[in-house]
């Protein structure tokens, strides 16, 4: 009951905040500009984003748009808090939605009618620029385009080059057996100094998710997130190799002690101090070690090891959706002018070159200068990095009974057990939930017998 009242109170406060924001905006529109003309004569476009890491850069670009556009449009950017998804739902329910908004959950936003298709707004040239990066159920549904990609997270094995050299290891591991062996060598070399070969943030289920969902899609050609696109069902056997390797490192004592209560930022702090040999994470790390945990160690990022040393499929890039136009906007044409500006190659190139994200736009990757930030070169898209089609994992997990897949595998890594039983249990529960999700219309994704992640290779880079 207490939680219920807290939730009600929280929603009430958020609604009041939105109303206050709306009142403030109305007041602003009544002010006059430096020329003495009423600012209310301008078309006001409200833009919402939850991103803080690029807020200063984007605000400068918004200011530039407001000064230079010839359509008398004024954009107001609001950087929202951690309750962004809730704020969006309340804004649409109370008819106070922004004109342009960052998309937190593409399929849900489309199903709820939050977004406007942009096919008719896009020029032929713009469609050509983005044609190879549009993903069904991430950018478009039933041929209707709602959003375009901008940046994404590339995932890598991150390793301490100094510790590798000290342990006599010439190169980062390419197989899971080498991963286990290298972690053991580093631990044997440095344990007396508090140095261990491997770590992952097992305080939450991402302790398994981060390494396994980087390794698995590279080791197979059929899917990611436990979903087999070919059969249209879940098959968690794709994680067996990664689970066994992580469990072996735990048994060998190669894992940093206390990983069961370790979160990602404490892990990063330990890595920055030279106490961890390897871990898996994404392309946000160069910024982390520049700003959040400055470090003097020599570190780099490598493609993930696989079961046999070859990348059969593709390493998943997390991303694909960015911003869209509210279906409730009274100023859709003006909103598109701003959205078109944000997606311009000039702005997207500057965004990429300044290191705010790894671009998913081929034209930007081809012409843009590589960001000048230590460590970023290892995260730049390669031939084996790819955007996967959407899958029904989120819709399925809303129906699944019991703990989720990453939680179950995490338990196995930390405590041992029978990995085959874990796989069988997850397959049974997830496929029952998938059936329910399809029957209730939560997902329309079906089997694609022709799918192979080999066909995803090389769309962003041929290197």
Image (cartoon, helix red, strand yellow):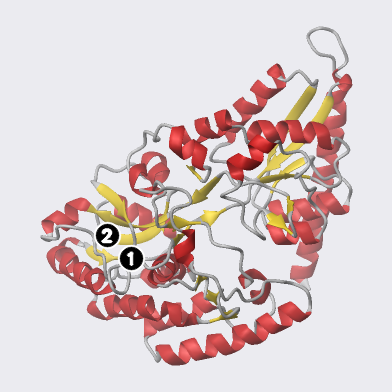
Query: Is 104 drawn above or below residue 175 in the view shown?
Result: above
**Can residue 354 be spotted in the picture?**
no
Horizontally, residue 57 falls left or right of residue 417, namely right
Query: Is 172 drawn above or below residue 261 in the view shown?
Result: above
Query: Is 260 drawn above or below residue 322 in the view shown?
Result: below
Quadrant assignment, res 190: bottom left
Residue at the image point whose x is 15% and y is 65% from the top: 192
Return the x and y of residue 210 as percentages of the image width and height: 44, 65
| SS class, disc 1 | loop
Q: Nearer the viewer, residue 121 or 36?
A: 121
Quadrant assignment, res 263: bottom left
First of labels 2, 1 by sequence position? 1
Return the x and y of residue 172 as percentages of the image width and height: 23, 59
How far, Cα to Cα, is label 2 from label 1?
A: 7 Å
Residue at the image point whose x is 66% and y is 27% from the top: 62
Mark 2 crowdedness (10 Å alpha carbons): few <14, some 14-19, many ≥20: many
Residue at the image point whose x is 49% and y is 81% from the top: 236
Q: Does the CB distance between marks 2 and 1 fall below 8 Å?
A: yes
Q: Nearer the viewer, residue 129 or 156?
A: 129
Return the x and y of residue 70 as percentages of the image width and height: 76, 18
Q: Which residue is mark 1?
A: 199
Horizontally, residue 356 falls left or right of residue 59, namely left
Query: Is 220 drawn above or below residue 386 in the view shown?
Result: below
Count up the numbered dots: 2
Horizontally, residue 426 falls left or right of residue 281, namely right
**Can residue 241 be spotted in the picture?**
yes
| SS class, disc 2 | strand
Q: Which residue is mark 2?
A: 276
Return the x and y of residue 258 as percentages of the image width and height: 35, 70
């Amino acid at each position: 009951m207490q939680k219920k009242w807290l939730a009600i109170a929280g929603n009430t406060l958020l609604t009041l905040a939105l109303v206050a924001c709306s009142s403030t905006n109305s007041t602003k529109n009544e002010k006059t500009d430096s020329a003495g003309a009423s600012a209310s004569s301008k078309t006001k476009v409200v833009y919402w984003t939850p991103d803080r890491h690029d807020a200063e850069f984007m605000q400068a670009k918004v200011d530039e748009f407001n000064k230079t556009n010839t359509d008398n449009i004024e954009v107001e950017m609001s950087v929202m808090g951690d309750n962004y998804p809730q704020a969006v739902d309340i804004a649409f329910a109370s008819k106070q939605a922004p004109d342009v908004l960052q998309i937190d959950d593409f399929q849900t936003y489309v199903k709820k009618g939050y977004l406007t298709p942009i096919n008719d707004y896009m020029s032929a040239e713009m469609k050509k620029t983005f044609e190879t990066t549009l993903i069904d159920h991430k950018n478009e549904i039933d041929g209707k385009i709602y959003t375009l990609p901008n940046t994404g997270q590339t995932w890598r094995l991150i390793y301490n080059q100094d510790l590798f050299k000290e342990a006599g290891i010439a190169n980062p591991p390419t197989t899971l057996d080498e991963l286990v062996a290298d972690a053991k060598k580093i631990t044997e070399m440095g344990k007396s100094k508090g140095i261990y070969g491997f770590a992952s943030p097992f305080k939450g289920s991402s302790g398994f998710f981060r390494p396994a969902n980087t390794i698995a899609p590279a080791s197979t050609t059929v899917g990611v997130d436990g979903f087999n696109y070919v059969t249209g069902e879940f098959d968690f056997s794709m994680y067996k190799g990664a689970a066994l390797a992580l469990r072996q490192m735990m048994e060998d004592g190669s894992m940093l002690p206390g990983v069961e209560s370790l979160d990602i930022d404490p892990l990063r702090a330990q890595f920055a101090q030279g106490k961890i040999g390897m871990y898996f994470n994404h392309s946000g790390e160069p910024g982390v070690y520049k700003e959040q945990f400055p470090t003097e160690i020599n570190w780099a990022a490598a493609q993930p090891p696989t079961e046999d040393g070859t990348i059969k499929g593709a390493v998943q890039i997390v991303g694909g959706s960015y911003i869209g136009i509210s279906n409730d906007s009274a100023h859709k044409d003006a909103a598109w002018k701003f959205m078109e500006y944000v997606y311009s190659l000039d702005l997207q190139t500057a965004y990429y070159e300044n290191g705010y994200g790894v671009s998913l736009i081929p034209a930007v990757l081809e012409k843009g200068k590589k960001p000048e930030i230590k460590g970023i070169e290892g995260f730049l898209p390669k031939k084996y990095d790819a955007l996967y089609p959407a899958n029904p994992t989120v819709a399925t997990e809303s129906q699944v009974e019991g703990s989720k897949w990453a939680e179950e595998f995490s338990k196995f890594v930390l405590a041992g057990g029978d990995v085959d039983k874990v796989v069988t249990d997850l397959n049974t529960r997830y496929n029952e939930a998938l059936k329910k999700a399809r029957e209730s219309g939560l997902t329309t994704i079906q089997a694609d017998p022709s799918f192979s992640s080999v066909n995803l290779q090389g769309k962003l880079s041929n290197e």
